[in-house]
Amino acid sequence: MTAPYDPAQNQPPAGQFPPPQAGQFPPPPPGQFPAPPAPRKRAAWLVPTLIGVGAFVVLCCGGVTVLSLTGGDGKTETTSASSGAPADTSTDPAGAAAPAESAAAPKPEKTTAAPEPAKPKSPGIGDKVRGGDFEFTVKSVKCGISQVGSEFLNTRAQGTFCRVSVTVKNVTKSAHSFHADGSLTAQDASGRNYSVDGEAGIYGNSDGQGFLDEINPGNSVTANVYFDVPKGTKLKTITLDAGLFTFAEDAVVTL
């Protein structure tokens, strides 16, 4: 018959520790703490490797941050150099398209100044012009006349006479007197002004036309008016005086 299990039978005497099992360290003596386990040795290459990786990360992140702040085309080149990747040297399509668009843009058309309005044509021989109370029409001009009148009654020019045949018509509603001497003047190309020779006008008109003629409304008189000018002179214009007591402008006829 087996005796019942008594735990006290397998206990070591007081003050002693049971013998250690295989693969275990013996217990420490009484009053002492067990020694801490010896630290495991790290590989000698681990610490430098971690430091290098951290420095690489700092450089990469710092370079990208600086480039993002500065901006510009250097961003791609610096990032590529830091990462060891080759820089992209391809041409920007948008940049290439800008010059093409500028070249294709139409040139602005040259603006030309508006032509000046044509000046009204000056009245000439045969044209009717208004001068004060009368309407004048210069019919013809002839120069190089040395004497005016008959063989016995005549007058000679100091230089030479220019004869101007003119028709005068009263265009008002009342009668007016016309006197060629004082109403007409002649001008040459140099601007010299010539007055009417009244004596030549008396000899040069059969009935004294142009000398204090009283012309009724609607009637007209044709007279020969003479100007004594230097030999070789060519008259340029005839001016028809509108009169002293009128606001009308003088009429000018170009010969």
Image: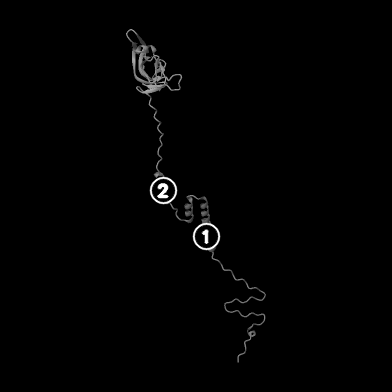
Q: Is residue 234 visible?
A: no
Q: How many marks?
A: 2
- How far apart are the alpha carbons under marks 2 and 1? 43 Å
The answer to whether residue 101 of the structure is visible from this angle is yes
Figure check: 101 above or below 225: below
How crowded pointer 2 is (Cα within 10 Å; few <14, some 14-19, many 20+) is rated as few
Which residue is drawn at the image coordinates 53% and 61% (left, top)?
50
Q: Quadrant of the C terminus?
A: top left
Give the residue number, with chain letter if any, for mark 2: 97
Residue that numbered label 1 is attached to: 53
**Where in the figure is residue 30, as x and y percent of width and height?**
66, 76
Report the amino acid beneath label 2.
Ala
Q: Nearer the viewer, residue 184 or 96?
A: 184
Query: In the shown orientation, is residue 36 left or right of residue 165?
Result: right
User: Looking at the rendering, which quadrant does residue 5 occupy?
Assistant: bottom right
Residue at 52% across, 58% down? 57
Nearer to us in this view, 187 or 44: 187
Residue at (52%, 60%) from the top-left corner? Answer: 53
In the image, 118 versus 90, the foreground residue is 118
Is 211 rendered above or below residue 124?
Answer: above
Mark number, residue 68: none
Q: Position of residue 166 (x, y in %)?
A: 36, 18
Give, as a three-letter code, the residue at label 1. Val
Please identify the quarter of the rendering in which residue 23 is found: bottom right
